[in-house]
């Protein structure tokens, strides 16, 4: 352990282990040190969820939040995603010293992928013939092209009801097909964005599109 680690952060290391062991293998608990330009993990349990270990850097959500400096607020109960497409339920809580300066953060990432799959099963089980599967129109028009793309992709994935990490090739091809039918790939940068969301290369997306269009 780094002897220069702030005493407040040192005192929280047992808390990291306690939370992780209480909630089990699907709960990753991470303690970050934030010092000058250093934003790295000093303690972590169940790191298999995001593939990180002690010394790994902070994820984008935390980095973005601390750009606000000491005015940064805790980010609680938000949707997140691991690098391999696991659906996560996360919270990021900032740790402050005696002068209210941010010196670190405690992050909790719960892998809810299996629960998302189960939710879809229950929804199908409870579905009746009188159910109206109608998506209400948006209350406002979004003129930002990037937001339009993100909304199309998010809506398509939500309708599919399965985390990306649980999808096989055929299912990913089907997602790409649905996006293509909605004109998503007419938007600049769509190939790279969809590739990132589906955890494949941009060349794989091109191959999927070729496969789809030849089939048509």
Image (spheres, grey):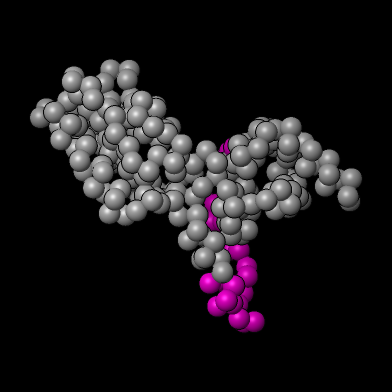
Residue 129 forms part of the magenta stretch: yes
Give the residue at x 20% y 41%.
14
Q: In the image, residue 132 lies at what x, y percent?
A: 61, 74
Q: In the image, residue 29 lies at what x, y percent?
A: 32, 43
- Seen from the viewer's position, the closer of residues 51 and 154 is 51
Note whether residue 70 is visible.
Answer: no
Number of numbered discs visible in the structure rendering: 0
- Seen from the viewer's position, the closer of residues 10 and 150 is 10
Give the residue at x 83% y 40%.
210
Residue 62 forms part of the magenta stretch: no
Q: In the image, residue 76 lies at what x, y percent?
A: 32, 47
Q: In the image, residue 77 lies at what x, y percent?
A: 35, 51
Q: Main secondary structure of the magenta part?
A: loop
Quarter of the view holding residue 211: top right
Give the residue at x 64% y 82%.
129
Image-based side of 186 in relation to 84, left or right:
right
| Magenta range | 122-146
In the rendered image, the quadrant that contains the N terminus is top left
Residue 146 position (above or below residue 3): below
Image-based side of 6 in relation to 171, left or right:
left
Residue 116 position (above or below residue 143): below
Note whether residue 211 is visible.
Answer: yes
Give the residue at x 10% y 30%.
98
Residue 45 position (above or below residue 9): below
Quarter of the view holding residue 121: bottom right
- Seen from the viewer's position, the closer of residues 134 and 195 is 195
């Amino acid at each position: 352990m780094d002897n220069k680690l702030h005493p407040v952060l040192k005192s929280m290391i047992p808390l990291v282990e306690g939370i992780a062991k209480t909630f089990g293998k699907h709960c990753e608990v991470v303690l970050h040190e934030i010092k000058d330009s250093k934003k790295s993990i000093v303690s972590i349990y169940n790191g298999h969820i995001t593939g990180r270990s002690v010394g790994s850097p902070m994820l984008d959500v935390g980095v973005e939040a601390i750009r606000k400096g000491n005015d940064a607020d805790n980010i609680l109960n938000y949707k997140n995603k691991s690098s391999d497409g696991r659906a996560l339920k996360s919270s990021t809580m900032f740790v402050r010293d005696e002068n209210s300066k941010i010196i670190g953060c405690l992050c909790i990432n719960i892998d809810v992928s299996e629960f998302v799959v189960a939710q879809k099963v229950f929804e199908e089980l409870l579905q009746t013939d009188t159910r109206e599967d109608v998506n209400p129109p948006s209350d406002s028009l979004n003129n930002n092209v990037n937001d339009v793309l993100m909304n199309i992709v998010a809506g398509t994935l939500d309708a599919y009801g399965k985390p990306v990490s649980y999808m096989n090739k055929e299912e990913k091809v089907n997602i790409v097909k649905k996006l293509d039918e909605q004109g998503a790939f007419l938007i600049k940068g769509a190939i790279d964005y969809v590739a990132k969301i589906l955890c494949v290369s941009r060349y794989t997306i091109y191959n999927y599109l070729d496969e789809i269009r030849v089939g048509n």
